[in-house]
Amino acid sequence: LISSIGRVIVGPIIGFVIIHVFNLSGFPAGVLLIQSSMPSAILCYLVGSMYSPKEIVDNISSMIVVSTLMSLVTVPIVVFFSLKYFS
């Protein structure tokens, strides 16, 4: 649960910091912010299922599910801010 929260909450914060560090604006800034708020990728599960024990794979799959469900709330908020401030 903590890693899922970190992924969908801390990800946009890190994206926002990168935008300011590299002084991005407009379309590239919006894309970076939206991409940084996306949930965990399914590729993590696929690689984990090949090389990790079952307990770790179960943790990875639960993180993907929780972060995807949380992103139903966080992604629209991030898209709103991206359109408001970077377009």
Image (spheres, rainbow, N blue to C red):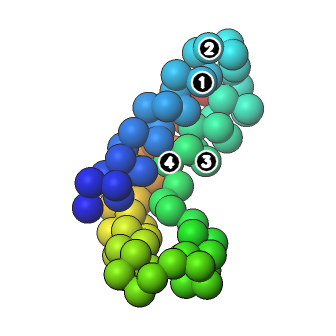
Q: Which residue is mark 2?
A: 21
At which x and y percent is residue 54?
41, 86
Who is closer to the viewer here, 24 or 22? Answer: 22
Q: Which residue is mark 3?
A: 35
The numbered disc on residue 40 is none
| N-terminal-most mark, 2 or 3 | 2
Proximity of marks 2 and 4: CB atoms separated by less than 8 Å? no
Identity, as a three-letter code, of the amino acid under mark 2: Val
Mark pair 2, 3: CA separation: 17 Å
Q: Secondary structure at mark 3?
A: helix
Tell me the crowding category of disc 1: few under 14, some 14 to 19, or many 20 or more residues within 10 angstroms, Cα based. some
Proximity of marks 4 and 3: CB atoms separated by less than 8 Å? yes
The N terminus lies in quadrant: bottom left
Identity, as a three-letter code, of the amino acid under mark 4: Ser
| N-terminal-most mark, 2 or 4 | 2
16 left or right of 86?
left
Q: Which residue is mark 4?
A: 37
Proximity of marks 1 and 2: CB atoms separated by less than 8 Å? yes
| N-terminal-most mark, 1 or 4 | 1
Mark pair 4, 3: CA separation: 5 Å
Mark pair 1, 2: CA separation: 5 Å
| N-terminal-most mark, 3 or 1 | 1
Who is closer to the viewer here, 25 or 52? Answer: 52
Q: Which residue is mark 1?
A: 18
Decide: is 46 above or below 70.
below
At which x and y percent is residue 20?
58, 15
Identify the residue at horizontal 48%, vertical 60% (top origin): 39
Tell me the crowding category of disc 4: few under 14, some 14 to 19, or many 20 or more residues within 10 angstroms, Cα based. many
18 left or right of 12?
right
Identify the residue at horizontal 35%, vertical 47% (top origin): 6
**Is residue 76 shown to the viewer in this render?**
no
Q: Secondary structure at mark 4?
A: loop
